[in-house]
Image (cartoon, rainbow, N blue to C red):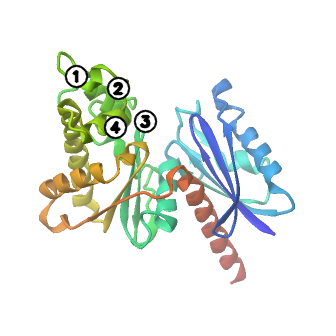
Amino acid sequence: MECVFGIDIGGTNIKIGKFHGDEMAESRQVKTDKGAAGANIIADVARAVREMQGDDVIAGIGVGVPGPVMDGVVLGAQNLGWKELNVIKEFEKYFPGVVIRVLNDANAAAVGEWAYGGGAGFSSFIFMTLGTGIGGGLIINNELVEGASGSTGEIGHIRVGYHNDRLCTCGLYDCIEQYASATGIVITANRLRVGRETILNEVEVTSKNVFDYAQLGDEVCLEVVNNMVEKLASALAAITNTVNPEAIVLGGGVSKAGQFLLDRVEKRFRELAFFSVRDTKFALAKMGNAAGMYGCAYEVRKKICRLRSTADR
């Protein structure tokens, strides 16, 4: 039987899914070996894929990587230790003749949510993943938009402050990632709790605890949430004013705050966005950590279909 693989390479773990059509037949997770500047990562993935292959024929491998991608070349993936690397050529060493598709990991998750999850039914939407950092993807007219340098969806680096207050890992200051990610929420909470009566002085300061205790009425936690929502809604309004999508889909660990977060972001967004885009719909992601695998598999199947269609002409 023919199969494809969807592979999501993260800084801590690599998620590998084997697909028959739209169905995931098997999945596996392996640790990301970042030693030697990530030199062993692709070999580790190739070994796992061969073990999972069984009697199937591998038609394609879709790979998501945490960095901008142009024509299969990742321009840099700091979380993996990679500088510029032609990921297609590296995989072809292990899988000659197999179709390879390489995407930015957040773009892959956007495709997964569009095809199977919270973005299903929309022909255009913004996907934003709120985790340790912030990533995103853009679907327009049922197609992933990757951009001239593979950097469409670098939503986390929209500037939302103007006082050089928080240095971002990208080297710039006051990116939305430093305010609305789990990391940014903790920074804000640690600043606001000093000298004040709050549960945050008694429990571990995490984004989950901030949202949990905000819902129970802790004033400092509510202030942290409101600060985060203001920054996030501002960024989303700017993006929506520019590309005018049908919907915004929020994913990532922070989005597990669910409707409590979504309602607040949506309300503030409608107050900040241009009047003609205020009816943009909001939704929560549904695919969780599997979105990247599904998105990579979907995109490589699409590439296979295009290649076979061209060959039949």
Label 1, on which residue? 193
The earlier-in-sequence mark between 2 and 3 is: 3
Q: CA distance from mark 4 to mark 2?
A: 18 Å
Determine crowd level at label 3: few under 14, some 14-19, many 20+ residues with C-alpha closer than 10 A: some
Q: CB atoms at circles 1 and 2 under 8 Å apart?
A: yes
At 75% from the left edge and 59% from the top edge, which residue is drawn? 98
Label 3, on which residue? 132
Of badges 4 and 2, nearer the viewer stands 2
At 40% from the left edge and 29% from the top edge, which residue is drawn? 169
Q: Position of residue 47 (x, y in %)?
A: 79, 43
Q: CB atoms at circles 2 and 3 under 8 Å apart?
A: no
Check residue 177 in the rendering and tell me which mark sits there, or answer none: 4
Q: CA distance from mark 1 to mark 3?
A: 21 Å
Relative to 100, say whether 81 is above or below.
above
The earlier-in-sequence mark between 1 and 2 is: 1
Label 2, on which residue? 205
Q: Amino acid at mark 1?
A: Arg
Task: Give the left or right position of residue 79, taking residue 28 as reference.
Answer: left
Q: Position of residue 211 (x, y in %)?
A: 30, 39
Q: CA distance from mark 1 to mark 4?
A: 21 Å
Q: Position of residue 166 (x, y in %)?
A: 28, 26
Task: Pick out the residue farthest to the right.
Answer: 55
Quarter of the picture holding the C terminus: bottom right
Of badges 1 and 4, nearer the viewer stands 1
The earlier-in-sequence mark between 4 and 3 is: 3
Task: Pick out the residue farthest to the top.
Answer: 195
Q: In which quadrant of the rendered view does residue 165 lie?
A: top left
Relative to 132, say whether 167 is above or below.
above
Determine crowd level at label 4: few under 14, some 14-19, many 20+ residues with C-alpha closer than 10 A: many
Relative to 248, say whether 40 is above or below.
above
> Dot 4 lies on which element?
helix
Q: CA distance from mark 2 to mark 3?
A: 14 Å
